[in-house]
Each structure stands twice: as structure tokens, then as C-alpha cells.
Image (cartoon, grey):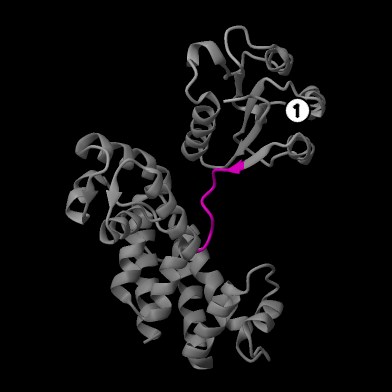
Amino acid sequence: MAGGTVRLVSGTDEILTAEAVRAAVDEGVGDADRAEVLHEFSGDEYTIEDLVIAASTPPMLATHRVVVARGLSRFGASELAHLIAWLDDPCPTTDLVLEWDAGRLPRQLSTAAEAAGGQRVSSDVPGGARHRRTWIEERIAESSVSLDARASAAIAEHLGSDLSRLGSILETLGAVYGAGMRLGPGDVLPYLGAEGDVPPWELTDAIDRGDVTAALAALQRMWGAGRHPLAVTASVTNHITRMARLDGAVAASAKEAAEVLGLRGSTFPASKALNACRRRGSDGIARAVELTAAADVDLRGRSGLDPRCITEILCARLAASAR
């Protein structure tokens, strides 16, 4: 594979970012001998000057070199300026892989990489249930095993929002069953481990449906992932507060509801809040506000109950009152 490419990988999840960097490196190395073409920098020992020198050095025994820089987020703007200058005139035989692993990606670095014809790679899982399902399906399609629809759905349901585990699960399934095997849910369930976390909207959706069982099940997965009761209750309270703000407001559409709530971007959250508001009605919303206010006081010391128990009682009552 010829050199002269730049891949800038960024993301908030350490595991997913590492997987994306590995995929970029594998693509860059191709069929070449890794020992001859690959030069990696990581940890706190290397400097930007070390990276620039390596990226500027022509290959000795191959057609190109793959230079990898991990953990670039530890460098300041003045140090990154040397890398940005190199990107103005990159070496045509170097395939450069850059990992930005924490914090906001500097615009100057992103712009310089794109100007050099580079490829931006985000390792973050997209938001929204539909986009998440598509992301999971794409990762499964790229793996060595073949899963039927029920097996794919079982994995997605089991992992919840803990999708950084997907890669290792697929690797395990490939090692156990072999490449190309068609697997069903019974084949994959023994290798999934503990149930993963779920996003807050899965809890509030269950509450809005009046599904007490699903709401409590979502809470158990949140507890298992280490979520704090105050944080969970804050998400639920925010959801109820949106309904209260829409109650009595002149909002006939999701767009108008988004304007009332001050939400930008997708109108989907506003649409959900508007539909929930209509289902509960003014009296139901008033009752929901009373329940969340009482739970907040209980969580701050009025009640002697365990905070998780208080939150579970709140969510069960909110779901029951939505029926």
C-alpha cells in the first residue's frame, strides 16, 4: 500500500478509540512486513519533534512507512504547531495515524489534517436508537462470524450502551466457532457476560409507556453500571420538567415544542416530550412533578431508605401513573 495518507482518529471511549487506531494501522500496513514499515509512538516519552522526524524519514526497505502517534491530547498548542506545519507539506511516503484520545479536538489540527487530504475517523457511537443499531450491524458485518437477526438483537439488547465490549465479544465468538459460522442467540448468549448499561432515555421511554417492569429492569442495569441515584433522578426530573414546560404552551408540532424548550438540532427529544405531555395531561403532569419533588427531598436526607430504593419507587410510581 502506498503512503502519503493521514488518518486522524478521535473519540471519548478508550477501547473504541484504540480499536479504531488499530484498524487504521492495519489498513496502512496492508500486506507489508510490520517490522519494516511500522513506527509507533506512545506514552509520555516522545515529543512532537520525534514524531515529525519519523514522519519525514523516507522508508529504507519498503515502499512506505506507517507512523503512529498515540495520546496527542497531552500536547499543547505550541507543540502541536510543529505537527501542523508538517501537515502543510507531508512526506509522500509516510502513512500517518494520529490519535486524539481526550478532550476537544483542536480545530487547527483537524483543519490541517483535512487540508492534507487526511481522513477524520470518529470512534464514538452515534446517538439515537436507529443510528446505534446501524453502527452495531456494521461492526458485526465486518467481523469474522455471521449472526442471524435474533443473535444481533440479543447482543444489542444485552450490551445496552456499553458498546465498547462489542469488539471483544465478536473476537471471542470468532475464536470459539471459527470464521464464517452462522450463529443464533443460543450460540452467543453464553459469551456476553454481565448486562451493560442503558441510556437514560430507555428508562424514561419505559416510564412514558407505563411499563413498570421495563422501568425497573432499566434501573437495575444502571445500578450495575455504577450510575448514582441522584444522576438517574436528575434525568427523570429533567424529562418531567420538559412536559411541565410544554403543558399549556402553544406547541402544536415538534418544531414548536423544541422552540419552547430551547432545544437545538434534532426535534426528536421535543417530539417525545410533547407526546408524553399529551398522554399525561395537566393533572398527570402535576402529579408527576409532585412525585419527583418528593423523591428529591427524600434523596437529600428526609427518608431513611436506600437512595436506589427511593429512585425505584419514584420510577415505578411515575410509570404506573402514565397508564
Name the residue at 32% across, 70% down.
214
- Residue 124 part of the magenta-drawn span: yes
- Tell me residue 311's x, y (percent): 39, 66
Residue 195 placement, left or right of 285: left
Along the viewing direction, whichever of 84 and 13 lies nearer the viewer: 84
Which quarter of the picture shows residue 119?
Answer: top right
Residue 230 visible: no
Along the viewing direction, whichever of 178 and 151 lies nearer the viewer: 178
Dot 1 falls on a residue whose secondary structure is: loop
Along the viewing direction, whichever of 266 and 8 lies nearer the viewer: 8
Q: Residue lying furthest top in this view?
A: 60
Name the residue at 64% across, 14% down.
46
Residue 95 placement, left or right of 84: left
> Looking at the picture, does residue 312 appear above or below residue 75?
below
Name the residue at 60% across, 76% down.
270
* Bounds of the magenta segment: 121-128
Which quarter of the picture shows residue 28?
Answer: top right
User: Which residue has dot 1 on it?
Assistant: 76
* Type of amino acid under label 1: Gly
- Tell me residue 251's x, y (percent): 66, 88
> Looking at the picture, does residue 164 appear above or below residue 65?
below
The C terminus, quarter of image: bottom left
